[in-house]
Image: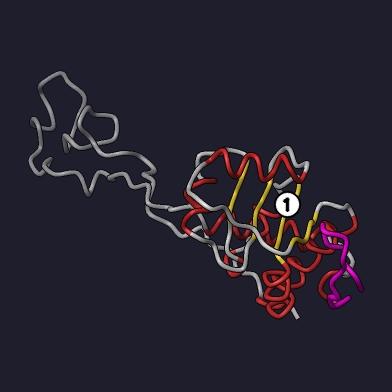
Amino acid sequence: MEIKLQNGGSVQVADGVFGREFNEGLVHQAVVAYMAASRSGTKAQKTRSEVSGGGIKPWRQKGTGRARAGTTRSPIWRTGGRAFAAQPRNYEQKINRKAYRVAMSGIFSELVRQGRLFVVDAIDVEAPKTKLVVSLLNGMGFNGVTLLVPEVVSENLYLAARNLGDVGVLDPRALDPVSLVGSDQVVITVAALKMVEEWLS
């Protein structure tokens, strides 16, 4: 199939990558798996056995008129341990590599069908200035959340775009389903498009 370039030309791409049917369930699974893997899972609290102290019985069992107590580190005590304490955990969800690639192909195919994938010859700026990226996007007529995907992310482009909240810059090897789905338009160079095609073929 052919994808039109912004300058009026066209580029040939594989139907199996950019003409695939959109599988909503599989794409959802890929998005959830990616977002779950980004969670740190480092939250930790101490149980009554992990809190320091509490080794001695605070008072004798009977005769004081107070409720019986065996430790000062019970969850109902101040400075005590936490009942049902949170522990470090891994939120990662398994998704097969082939299924992930099919989901990514489906996302790219849907971007093409919706006219949200724009292919250009090059994406770069002469200096690390935000106004250059703004003028570049305005010149192309883009607004909203925009993802720029050059074949190589130059330092100038990265520094110039990082201050724009609705503009993202990603290397084609670092593309993820969340960034693609959440973008109003994806601007990619021809070389980066070929790298994506090779990756997903």
Q: Position of residue 86 (x, y in %)?
A: 39, 46
Determine the residue positioned at 20% across, 31% down.
Answer: 79
Front residue of 32 and 3: 3
Q: Position of residue 42 (x, y in %)?
A: 37, 51
User: By what rule are the colours in the image chosen?
Assistant: secondary structure
Front residue of 72 and 36: 36
Magenta extent? 1-16
Image-quadrant location for residue 30: bottom right
Front residue of 72 and 146: 146
Determine the residue positioned at 43% across, 53% down.
Answer: 40
Q: Which residue is mark 1?
A: 181
**Left or right: 105 with respect to 85?**
right
Does dot 1 land on a helix, a strand or a loop? helix
- Position of the C terminus, as image quadrant, is bottom right
Q: Is 14 inside the magenta-drawn segment? A: yes
Determine the residue positioned at 71% across, 47% down.
Answer: 183
**Left or right: 106 with respect to 122?**
right
